Image (spheres, grey):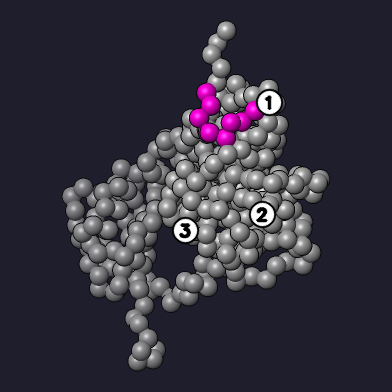
Amino acid sequence: MSADAAPPLHELVLTAPEALVEAVSDALGDELGALSVSVEDADAGSADEQAIFGEPGLPAPRGAWQRSTLRALFETEAAATAAATLLLGQDWAAGLHVTALAPVAPTDWVRLTQSQFEPVPVTPEFWIVPSWHEPPPGARRWIRLDPGLAFGTGTHPTTRMCLRWIAREAGQGARWARVLDYGCGSGILAIAAALHGAREVDAVDIDPAAVQATRGNAQDNGVRLHVGLPEAAAGAYELVLANILATPLKLLAPLLCGHLAAGAPLVLAGILERQADEVAGAYAPWLDLTVLDAEEGWVLMGGRRRADRGGSGSGLRLPPSPA
């Protein structure tokens, strides 16, 4: 080791029954100086492996696995040893076992993080490409996008389905004069629309960090977007995109439909298959939503604004009163 090299970190590995996981995790992180603590299924890969997480949006049915592996990282071997000694000496720690205590090899975290994000295909010709990769052979169009604070890197099924829809419709000759990406996150859908020929694209989000991320990503991809908070959306659009979640999508139905020009398509994502009917019901006064695509339990829904109820562009039009 050179004189300038930092001493290696040390990892303490413990096995704990379900009842002790929370207490041991808290003690490691809050009182014993662990730099990080992770919890894994001790029986992962075996016949006893358990799934403890439910569907998105639903609470986890259990707080921990029946047998959990806890991995705690410490600055020194002495700190890791002291933590293990103190934990095993507690009256309440019956069933807790030390399975390993060893130095951790130095890691190039930047390179490791980058290696986890490869180019993502949308279609054989359209890709999402991190800045440290070259576009794959055969790619004719791509979005440069790195992982960041805002949602939407192209890896989630909801985002991929939206991107596929944009690429497919543009490939069939669709051209949009004005597009609204409501809840833009990273701006990936707005950028995709611009790359596929949309002349004017508004991208809005309630999160200022998303607004900032979208502006930066648009610049990196050489496209011009109008980016801002939701009040920046104005007038009627020939396409409205919203990749959020089912509950806010239902609440936003009057606003989103109010921004649709007569006959214009609305494309919604962030909807689980079991939520499709209730989302369709929320939009029924303005248009008929149908499932356009499905992937990994998520659906893409879309429909066109009825010509007899043209969008006012106010974003505030309410459903008609019952007869």
Q: Is residue 228 left or right of residue 309?
A: left
> Is 141 contained in the magenta span?
no
Q: Residue furthest right?
A: 172
> Label 3 neighbourhood size at 10 Å, few (<14), some (14-19), many (20+)?
some
Q: Which mark is residue 212?
A: 3
Mark 2: amino acid: Ala
Question: Who's the residue at 58% across and 31% down the image?
Answer: 312
Mark nearer the N terminus (1 vs 3):
3
Q: Position of residue 32 (x, y in %)?
A: 23, 62
Q: Is residue 16 above or below residue 12?
A: above
Question: Range of the magenta residues?
Answer: 310-318
Question: Who's the residue at 52% across and 53% down the image?
Answer: 227
Magenta residues: mostly which secondary structure? loop
Q: Position of residue 117 (x, y in %)?
A: 58, 63
Q: Position of residue 217 (x, y in %)?
A: 56, 61
Mark 1: amino acid: Arg
Element class at badge 2: helix
Q: Residue furthest top?
A: 323
Can the viewer see residue 118 in this picture? Answer: no
| Residue holding disc 2 | 194
Q: Quadrant of the C terminus?
A: top right
Q: Quadrant of the N terminus?
A: bottom left
Q: Is residue 76 above or below residue 175?
A: below
Element class at badge 3: helix
| Residue holding disc 1 | 306
